[in-house]
Image (tube, rainbow, N blue to C red):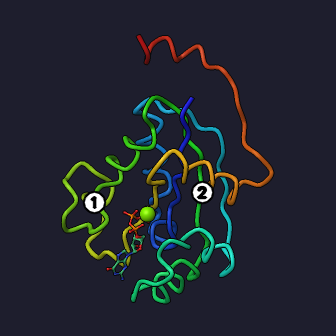
Amino acid sequence: SERTYIMVKPDGVERGLVGEVISRFEKRGFKLLGLKAVQPTRQHLEQHYGDLKDKPFFPKLVDYMLSGPVVGMVWAGLSVVKTGRVMLGATNPLASAPGTIRGDYAIDVGKNICHGSDSVDSAEKEIALWFPEGVCNYTRSLDKLIYE
Ligand code: GTP
Ligand code: MG
């Protein structure tokens, strides 16, 4: 099924919001396939955010993401890429609806707690980048209570 890469950024990790992010995806019914805390390297981040390298905020973004460990995860389920982004909220937390992660816990765009892949294609690239060792795959009896 469809997979996405969700990452709790250094501010989210330091603020103790890892469990909150995991919990929301679990309770929604998505399936956890991978989970890892890691101190990212500059090279890794420059690949991850390659599309943004010409943006004026890029150096600041990389410094922010280097400021501590991140927690990366892979979630699977129906429309999980798009739905995951809805659950995170708008990029700028001041524009994020209450009930979203950013809308409930963040204020500034440069400290917006979490990342979510923006397409199925970038999700697969990000999963390969952050989980080169691969992730789990399993079937859940629970799925019959979540999917019709
Ligand atoms: P991600 O899920 O983190 O990829 O966010 P996004 O897809 O909603 O936004 P985008 O990929 O365009 O930007 C990536 C990250 O760069 C954002 O989540 C912000 O942390 C940061 N960012 C984006 N725009 C700005 C900006 O104008 N100023 C600053 N300081 N940071 C920004
Ligand atoms: Mg993005």
Q: Nearer the viewer, residue 118 or 146?
A: 118
Residue 28 in the image: state x and y as whole percent.
40, 33
Q: Mark 2 sits on what residue?
A: 72
Residue 26 in the image: state x and y as whole percent.
48, 36
For the C terminus, the image quarter is top left
Residue 121 in the image: state x and y as whole percent.
55, 48
| Residue labelled 1 has its Cβ within 8 Å of some atom of ligand 1 | yes
Q: Mark 1 sits on what residue?
A: 90
Amino acid identity at mark 1 = Ala
* 2 or 1: mark nearer the eye: 1
Identity of the residue furthest to the right in this view: 133
x 70%, y 31%: residue: 137
* Picture quadrant of residue 103: bottom left
x 29%, y 76%: residue: 108
Against 108, is 26 above or below? above
Q: Earlier in the sequence, mark 2 or mark 1?
A: 2
Quadrant of the rendered image holding ligand 1: bottom left
Mark 2: few, some, or many residues within 10 Å (few <14, many ≥20)? many
Helix, strand or loop under label 2: strand
x 60%, y 57%: residue: 72
Against 79, is 11 above or below? below
Using the numbered discs, state the Cα–Cα distance from disc 2 to disc 1 in whole angstroms. 19 Å
Helix, strand or loop under label 1: loop
* Picture quadrant of residue 66: bottom right
x 76%, y 46%: residue: 134
Amino acid identity at mark 2 = Gly
For the N terminus, the image quarter is top right
